[in-house]
């Protein structure tokens, strides 16, 4: 190899080494797992860490995930990676996952499904094998494609920040070099790699950006567009960090995280711009529900902010947002319309997390004061079988102390029951009439009177 070629090869290596040092990506004694697809980028990463493992004082292994999307080509990719690791005595993990089948079942894109599966496998290996870092071979050109993809998708500062250098235990040291440099390096070392034909398939949105948009921008607008976009990315990273600090402050002041839901005091954010509110919503949803929402979801949420209490929208993967009087309430739609549950006098039954017990007693205790969990009713004109269910639109009863019928919906609104709690509110029925809006009020027709011969005690726990 000529001295010119050696210098060129060394220059590329030094750029990666400096990037690793500047961003503190590796520590001594780290166990490094390299995501190896067989393509040029990951093969470069493999060769680089193979060569400099002693310098960094690390150990390396490799992992290949066969997505089963390209038939025999995918099998050849797996075989190539296996042979490469075997020839260099590097521990090798291989996984086979039918990404297409999973994507169809979950109604997600191939790209999103593949990414989620990869991260899940990475996390499992980190936990089971104790790896300190995982190297993915994203390079500078990938970063530019990501920024443009996010820009046209309507992302904010986070999207314009591009691919993060570090994501948990995933590191991306090749963000310091271009695809051209990677291919040059592999040519100089005479290292073969696998070509992925799907990289030229323009049904994938990123490939359109890579193969059409970026070349057109360079030709017609600015040949240095890559440098311009990378500079934009660095500025966006700084601004996003400042924005995040402000959003964290807002979250402390306006967000309540419960076991089954998250409440965002949206009225406290009245003077905050929609851009910042959008970042807050994205962060809360991602961190608490592990769902990445898109600009269309955010637009729907901002519109919901202007709607009357009680309105709901469904976001991705069953996530529901309910507009309360002063807040948003986010929860997963895991509650299906329940069947009617029959309960007899002397028995207990459970619906959702509530247990109801009905039994006959001789009389009411002298010092009884209703606490909502225990009530006494007259059972003279009631059947032995009651029905416990979620109230529905049109249900009516006569609240204790009143004379006329009232809609359960209006009653719940009057006593300021939140929309979220309304959806789970139970009623106890007998002979098609509501006896008890559970935990809140009995029907006036069933109150104890002097002529009552059969006293029933109903309890909620």
Image (spheres, rainbow, N blue to C red):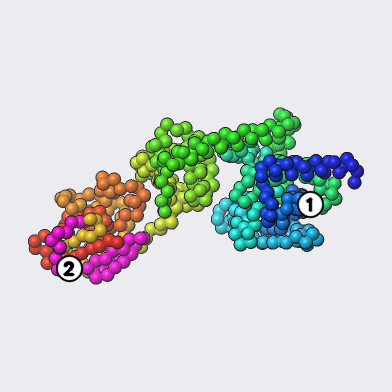
Q: The magenta stretch spans which residues?
A: 342-370
Q: Is residue 342 left or right of residue 195?
A: left
Q: Is residue 146 left or right of residue 302?
A: right
Residue that label 2 marks: 361
Which residue in the rendered view is the most extreme toward the bottom? 346
Q: Is residue 275 visible?
A: yes
Q: How packed is label 2: few (under 14 Cα within 10 Å), some, or many (20 or more)?
A: few
Q: For mark 2, give the secondary structure.
A: strand
Choose the circle earlier in sequence order: 2 or 1: 1
Q: Quadrant of residue 179?
A: top right
Q: Where residue 155 sits: x, y (%)? A: 57, 38
Q: Is residue 300 visible?
A: no
Foreground: disc 2 or disc 1: 1
Which residue in the rendered view is the most extreme toward the right? 2
* Residue 369 covered by magenta stretch: yes
Q: Residue at x 80, y 61 (%)?
A: 87
Residue that label 1 marks: 51
Q: Nearer the viewer, residue 148 or 23?
A: 23
Q: Where residue 140 sits: x, y (%)? A: 70, 41
Q: Residue at x 70, y 48 (%)?
A: 137
Q: Nearer the viewer, residue 166 or 81?
A: 166
Is residue 444 positioned above or below 24 on the image?
below
Contact, mark 2 vs mark 1 (Cβ under 8 Å): no
Q: Where residue 113 sits: x, y (%)? A: 60, 53
* Residue 48 covered by magenta stretch: no
- Work out how far the residue at label 2 is from the one at label 1, CA to CA, in angstroms: 83 Å
Q: For mark 1, give the secondary structure.
A: helix
Is residue 271 positioned above or below 115 on the image?
above
Q: Quadrant of residue 435?
A: bottom left
Q: Is residue 431 left or right of residue 8?
A: left
């Amino acid at each position: 190899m000529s001295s010119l070629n050696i210098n060129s090869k060394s220059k590329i290596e030094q750029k990666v080494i400096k990037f690793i040092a500047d961003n503190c990506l590796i520590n001594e004694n780290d166990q490094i797992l390299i995501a190896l697809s067989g393509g040029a980028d990951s093969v470069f990463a493999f060769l680089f860490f193979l060569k400099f493992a002693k310098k960094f004082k690390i150990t390396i292994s490799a992992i290949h995930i066969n997505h089963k999307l390209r038939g025999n080509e995918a099998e050849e990719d797996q075989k190539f990676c296996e042979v490469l690791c075997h020839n260099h005595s590097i521990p090798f993990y291989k996984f086979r996952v039918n990404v297409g089948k999973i994507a169809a079942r979950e109604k997600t894109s191939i790209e999103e499904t593949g990414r989620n599966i990869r991260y899940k496998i990475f996390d499992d290996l980190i936990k089971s094998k104790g790896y300190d870092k995982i190297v993915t071979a994203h390079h500078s050109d990938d970063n530019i494609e990501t920024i443009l993809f996010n820009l046209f998708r309507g992302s904010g500062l986070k999207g314009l920040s591009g691919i993060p250098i570090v994501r948990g235990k995933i590191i991306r040291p090749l963000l310091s070099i271009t695809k051209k440099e990677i291919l040059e390096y592999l040519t100089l070392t005479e290292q073969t790699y696998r070509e992925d034909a799907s990289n030229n398939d323009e049904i994938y949105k990123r490939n359109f950006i890579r193969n059409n948009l970026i070349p057109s921008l360079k030709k017609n607008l600015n040949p240095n567009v890559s440098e311009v976009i990378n500079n934009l990315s660095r500025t966006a990273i700084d601004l996003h960090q400042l924005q995040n600090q402000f959003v964290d402050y807002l979250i402390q002041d306006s967000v309540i995280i419960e076991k089954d839901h998250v409440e965002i005091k949206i009225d406290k954010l009245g003077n905050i711009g929609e851009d910042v509110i959008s970042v807050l919503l994205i962060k809360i949803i991602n961190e608490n529900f592990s769902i990445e929402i898109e600009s269309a979801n955010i637009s729907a949420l901002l519109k919901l902010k202007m709607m009357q209490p009680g309105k709901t929208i469904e976001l991705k993967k069953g996530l529901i947002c309910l507009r309360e009087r002063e807040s948003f309430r986010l929860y997963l739609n895991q509650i299906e319309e329940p069947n009617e549950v029959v309960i007899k006098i002397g028995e207990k039954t459970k619906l959702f997390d509530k247990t109801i017990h009905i039994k006959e007693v001789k009389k009411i205790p002298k010092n009884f004061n209703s606490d909502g969990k225990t009530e006494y009713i007259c059972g003279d004109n009631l059947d032995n079988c009651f029905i416990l269910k979620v109230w529905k639109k049109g249900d009516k009863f006569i609240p204790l102390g009143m004379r006329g019928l009232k809609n359960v919906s209006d009653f719940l609104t009057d006593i300021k029951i939140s929309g979220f709690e309304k959806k789970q509110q139970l009623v106890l029925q007998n002979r098609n009439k509501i006896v008890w809006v559970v935990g809140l009020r009995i029907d006036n027709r069933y109150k104890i009177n002097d002529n009552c011969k059969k006293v029933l005690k109903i309890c909620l726990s």
